[in-house]
Image: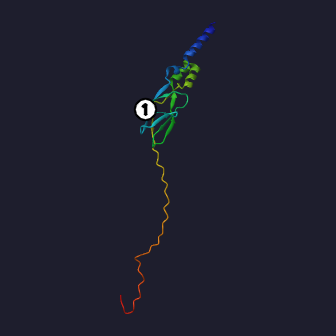
Amino acid sequence: MRKIMLLALAGLMTCFFTGCATIVKDDSQPVAFSSDPQDAVISINGTPRGKTPSTIMVKRSAKKQMVQYTLEGYETTTFPLEKSVAGMTFGNIIFGGLIGVGVDIATGKATNYQDSVHVLMKPIAPAPVAKLPDPPIAIKEEVAENVLAPTPAVPSGMQL
């Protein structure tokens, strides 16, 4: 009977302590986004969320959160949002065991995103203009007006 009670107590405690970060942390985390120049559209996983500069609540997820900056006249920049292991995860190993760590990892709450992101936008280079070949030179036959006509023969004894 005592073994059953201890086993039941252990099972009950496991239920209460599983997913420590899941209980303590929010579903989302604020991340500050900025760019140079400003007013770039920020999309997260393909969904527009605002313009720079702004702070956006990013949902925690075990999957990569893909961020995209777009601004007319500039190259589009796409990258995964960097994340790190949350300190709460290590405490969960002690108190929640493998079940708690598994829950935190599955919900994405075992990670923290970077606090801020700044992107230097690159201008789109103008397309190189194709140089057209030089047009062929038109050879014109010109009648010279100033060409001297042959000198008429001068009778002897006369001078010009």
Q: Return the residue nearer the eye: 150 or 16.
A: 150
Element at label 1: strand
| Kind of residue indicated by mark 1 | Ser
Mark 1 residue crowding within 10 angstroms, few (<14) / some (14–19) / many (20+) = some
Image height check: is 73 above or below 116?
below
Write down the residue under mark 1: 54
Q: Residue at x 51, y 19 (%)?
A: 23
Q: Residue at x 57, y 16 (%)?
A: 15
Q: Return the residue nearer the eye: 26 or 82.
A: 26
Q: Position of residue 93 (x, y in %)?
A: 56, 21
Q: Return the residue nearer the eye: 81 or 141.
A: 141
Image quadrant occupied by the C terminus? bottom left
- Residue 72, picture quadrant: top left
Q: Position of residue 35 (x, y in %)?
A: 43, 37
Image quadrant occupied by the N terminus? top right
Q: Position of residue 32 (x, y in %)?
A: 44, 31
Residue at the extreme bottom of the image, as rendered: 157
Q: How many marks?
A: 1
Q: Position of residue 85 (x, y in %)?
A: 52, 27
Q: Return the residue nearer the eye: 14 or 45.
A: 45
